[in-house]
Image (cartoon, rainbow, N blue to C red):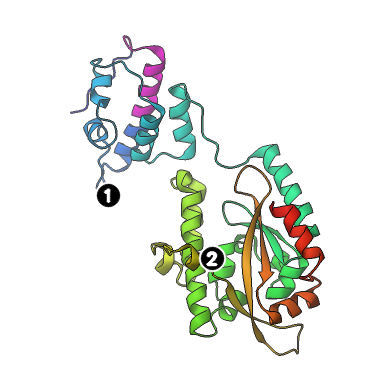
């Protein structure tokens, strides 16, 4: 049976932390009282003690008054499946700094403005992406390369996941035209999903994350790739892309090789620019037609952006 908190003899900070923990734990316990948790968690005080913090029951009964470390608070938040807001409430209650993994407010606005300026100056097909894999903006060269009018797509479809998986758009069919191309497409699909999961690991219980995954699960066979492991080898995940492309309507389709690069504009990983480099002669010719000469000015600009 769960014990009651003794809030009168605990130090103030510890009382606040235990109060926050119990509020969240009780909420989870009530949520799964009548339905089975996927991992059979029961969210009792004893289970929290056994699974996340071995002296939790001692804190509740005043047998210990030592404030849990930051790492212990995070372990408790993971067990309780906290949202990012709940996790930060626990950290603040314990007197620790909250975690901010993504830019917000004015900082995000400035980063997006910088991304816009850099992308438009960069002589490469490119787009700006957020940590949610949203495509904020794409330049003309990218839209011409893949023949996708980004601004005309429904807002919920302007994402890297939709463009990669959704058969309504040309990237999938043009990246899976033979066995080799399909294998590369699959590798990038798995690596992209695992990157999304890893980058957003602390938000995986947030409402926006759960809503986004429900949307993604409606796309073709996205579910089939969700749990696949990313390639172990660095060479596997850094392989170039192979896509069918053409220099305008009426021109012959040809396979080209591209390499995707990532350009961050702040101390955070996102928002960032996703740009494409030509890897073979057909790609270089196409880039010239797109107005993106590979030689000369490109080399100098890339050095200034990436270094």
Q: Residue at x 72, y 64 (%)?
A: 151
Residue 25, x across and y down, in percent? 33, 33
Residue 13: within the magenta?
Answer: yes
The label shown at residue 39 is 1
Numbered disc 2: secondary structure: loop
Give the labeled residue for mark 2: 238
Question: What residue is drawn where x is 55% and y is 64%?
Answer: 161
Q: Is residue 269 visible?
A: yes
- Between 38 and 269, the one lying in front of the other is 269
Q: What residue appears at the point 59 percent right and 77 percent down from the top-left corner?
A: 242
Q: Residues within 10 Å of mark 1 (few under 14, many from 20)?
A: few
Circle 2 packing at 10 Å, graded few (<14), some (14-19), many (20+), is some
Lateral position of residue 118 relative to residue 104, left or right: right
Q: Is residue 119 above or below residue 255?
A: above
Query: Residue at the left extreme?
Result: 1
Rendering coords of residue 265 (x, y %)? 69, 48
By secondary structure, the bulk of the magenta-drawn segment is best described as helix
> Can residue 206 be seen in this snapshot?
no
* Mark 2 → mark 1, Cα distance in angstroms: 35 Å
In the image, which residues are magenta?
A: 8-22
x, y percent for residue 72? 35, 30
Location of residue 88 with respect to 249 vertically, above or below: above
């Amino acid at each position: 049976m769960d014990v009651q908190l003794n809030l009168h003899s605990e130090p103030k900070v510890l009382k606040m932390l235990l109060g926050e923990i119990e509020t969240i734990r009780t909420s989870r316990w009530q949520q799964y009282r009548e339905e089975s948790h996927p991992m059979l968690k029961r969210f009792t005080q004893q289970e929290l003690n056994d699974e996340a913090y071995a002296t939790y029951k001692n804190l509740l009964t005043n047998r210990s008054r030592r404030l849990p470390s930051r790492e212990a608070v995070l372990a408790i938040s993971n067990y309780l499946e906290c949202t990012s807001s709940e996790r930060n409430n626990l950290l603040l209650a314990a007197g620790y700094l909250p975690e901010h993994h993504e830019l917000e407010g004015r900082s995000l606005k400035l980063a997006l403005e910088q991304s816009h300026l850099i992308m438009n100056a960069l002589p490469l097909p490119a787009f700006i992406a957020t940590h949610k894999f949203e495509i904020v903006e794409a330049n003309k060269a990218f839209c011409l390369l893949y023949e996708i009018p980004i601004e005309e797509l429904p807002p919920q479809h302007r994402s890297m996941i939709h463009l990669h998986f959704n058969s309504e758009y040309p990237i999938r069919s043009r990246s899976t035209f033979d066995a080799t191309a399909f294998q590369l497409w699959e590798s990038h699909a798995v690596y992209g999903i695992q990157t999304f999961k890893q980058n957003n690991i602390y938000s995986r219980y947030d409402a926006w994350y759960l809503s986004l995954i429900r949307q993604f699960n409606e796309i073709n066979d996205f579910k089939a790739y969700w749990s696949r492991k990313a390639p172990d080898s660095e060479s596997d995940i850094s392989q170039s892309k192979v896509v069918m492309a053409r220099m305008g309507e009426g021109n012959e389709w040809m396979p080209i090789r591209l390499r995707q690069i990532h350009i961050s504009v702040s101390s955070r990983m996102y928002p960032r620019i996703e740009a494409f480099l030509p890897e073979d002669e057909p790609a270089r010719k196409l880039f010239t037609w797109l107005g993106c000469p590979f030689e000369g000015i490109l080399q100098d600009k890339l050095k200034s952006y990436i270094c």
